[in-house]
């Protein structure tokens, strides 16, 4: 649990209480890509797959919501 707090503190937000469960399957290539992104943001930080996925997804979601909406 300490690892999760460290990672969330690194991105400047408090860890929310996790009340929802989501399962997903990733290809080895997708997981390697996410690992590489995490290693770039937090070099040397031991991160679980769950924390890796949730943190990067949250960062991207916040980025999307801050940018002006694109219309196709």
Image: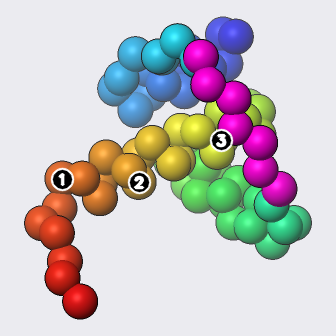
Residue 30 as seen in the image, left or right of residue 10: right
Horizontal and vertical percent for residue 2?
Answer: 66, 10
Most distant residue in the right direction: 28
Q: Which residues are magenta?
A: 19-25
Tell me which numbered mark, 1 or 3, is placed earlier along the sequence. Answer: 3
SS state under label 2: helix
Query: What residue sits 18% from the left and 82% below the top?
Result: 71
Residue bearing mark 1: 66
Q: Is residue 47 magenta?
A: no
Marks 1 and 2 in Cβ contact (< 8 Å): no
Asked if the stretch drawn in magenta spans residue 22, the answer is yes
Q: Secondary structure at mark 3?
A: helix
Residue 20, above or below 71 = above
Check residue 60 in the rendering and tell me which mark sits there, or answer none: 2
Left or right: where 9 falls relative to 40: left
- Dot 1 alpha-carbon crowd within 10 angstroms: few under 14, some 14 to 19, many 20 or more: few
Instruction: Tell me residue 63's x, y (percent).
Output: 29, 54
Residue annotated with mark 3:
52
Q: Toward which corner of the image does residue 64 lie, by quadrant?
A: bottom left
């Amino acid at each position: 649990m300490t690892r999760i707090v460290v990672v969330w503190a690194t991105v400047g937000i408090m860890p929310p209480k996790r009340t929802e469960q989501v399962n997903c399957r990733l290809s080895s290539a997708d997981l390697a890509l996410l690992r590489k992104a995490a290693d770039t943001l937090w070099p040397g930080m031991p991160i679980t797959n769950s924390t890796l996925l949730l943190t990067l997804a949250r960062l991207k979601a916040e980025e999307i919501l801050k940018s002006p909406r694109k219309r196709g």
